[in-house]
Image: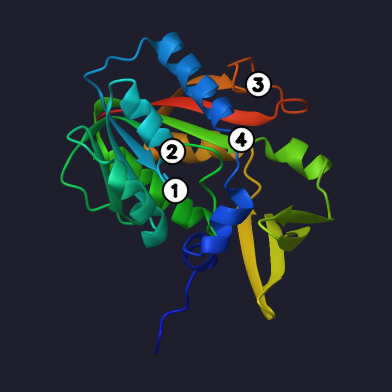
């Protein structure tokens, strides 16, 4: 029996995913990463891993600043876009966050721009966090950048149309069993396509519970890319800086 394909395996490997999201603001990402590096005075000798790296834009930028970076993503298509940028301090691999079979250990793990909570249950979240902890060196750091779910839920746009590259994407959003579900449909060359995104509406309390159980200590909590203090009602992001707690 053929195993059912997860929504993210199908959608993230589609060229239309990159069309819909291809113009995400890289300047905003660079601003965020520069703020982090300055605040924590990150050592250039540190080995970084960018988990769910997509086409590698953030990995490439961090490498341009002098860091040794490995980018990992489940999408073969995304990694194929990143591979031409590899050098002796920048590497990309196809990998599943639920089963990270990597030979190297890292000082800092990054999970940026809401690339977590794609699964249907907390147990899988815990599995992923356990995999991340295992690939970190003693006293390694883990940064997770997630949406501020309470604010997102309060301002959820039920339906919209987005026009990109002569394609009209019809997007519908709903909340179902703790998941924010986005249905995406469009037509190309008289053929209809439909995809779905699902992300758990995880709160700070959820992360505090999961991270503590796995063995991470939360050191800092920020609410935006300027690294201002987190406020559940008003912050755009939930950014957590964590440290691996070694037995």
Which of discs 2 and 3 lies nearer the camera? The answer is 2
Q: Residue 202 location in percent, x, y?
A: 62, 44
Residue under numbered circle 3: 230
Can residue 177 be seen? no
Q: Measure how far apart labels 4 and 3 are at the Cα level.
A: 13 Å
Q: Is residue 142 left or right of residue 5?
A: left
**Residue picked out by circle 4:** 205
Mark 1 → mark 3, Cα distance in angstroms: 26 Å
| Crowdedness near tag 3: few (<14), some (14–19) or many (≥20) residues, C-alpha within 10 Å | many
Is 14 situated left or right of 230 in this image? left
Label 3: element kind: loop
Q: Are marks 2 and 3 in contact (CB under 8 Å)?
A: no
Select label 1 or label 2 by which is in front: 2
Query: Does residue 164 appear left or right of residue 1 in this picture?
Result: right
Using a 10 Å C-alpha cutoff, classify the residue at mark 1 as few (fewer than 14 neighbours), some (14 to 19) or many (20 or more). many
The residue singled out by tag 2 in the image is 57
Above or below, comparing residue 168 to residue 100 in the picture? below
Q: Are marks 1 and 2 in contact (CB under 8 Å)?
A: yes
Question: Given contact means CB atoms under 8 Å apart, are the residues at marks 1 and 3 in contact?
Answer: no
- Which picture quadrant has residue 184? bottom right
All told, the count of numbered labels is 4
Q: Quadrant of residue 155?
A: top right
Quadrant for the N terminus, please: bottom left
Q: Which residue is mark 1?
A: 54
Q: Is residue 91 left or right of residue 58?
A: left
The picture places residue 122, in percent across and down from the top left corner, at 52, 53
Residue 109 visible, this orientation: yes
Task: Tell me the SS state at disc 4.
Answer: helix
């Amino acid at each position: 029996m053929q195993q059912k394909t997860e929504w993210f395996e199908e959608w993230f490997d589609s060229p239309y995913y990159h069309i819909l999201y291809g113009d995400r603001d890289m300047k905003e990402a660079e601003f965020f990463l520069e703020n982090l590096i300055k605040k924590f005075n990150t050592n250039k000798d540190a080995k970084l891993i960018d988990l769910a790296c997509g086409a590698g834009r953030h990995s490439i930028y961090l490498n341009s600043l002098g860091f040794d970076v490995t980018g990992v993503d489940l999408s073969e298509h995304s990694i194929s876009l990143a591979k031409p940028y590899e050098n002796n301090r920048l590497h990309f691999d196809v990998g599943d966050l639920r089963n990270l079979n990597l030979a190297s250990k890292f000082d800092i793990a990054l999970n940026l721009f809401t690339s977590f909570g794609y699964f249907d249950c907390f147990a899988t979240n815990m599995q992923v966090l356990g995999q991340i902890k295992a690939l970190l060196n003693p006293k390694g750091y883990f940064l997770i950048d997630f949406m501020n779910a309470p604010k997102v839920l309060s301002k959820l746009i039920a339906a919209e149309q987005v026009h990109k590259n002569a394609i009209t994407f019809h997007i519908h959003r709903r909340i179902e069993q703790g998941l924010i579900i986005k249905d995406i449909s469009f037509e190309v060359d008289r053929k209809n396509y439909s995809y779905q995104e699902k992300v758990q509406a995880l709160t700070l309390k959820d992360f505090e519970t999961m991270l503590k159980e796995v063995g991470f200590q939360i050191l800092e909590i920020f609410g935006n890319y300027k690294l201002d203090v987190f406020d559940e009602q008003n912050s755009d992001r939930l950014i957590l800086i964590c440290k691996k707690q070694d037995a």
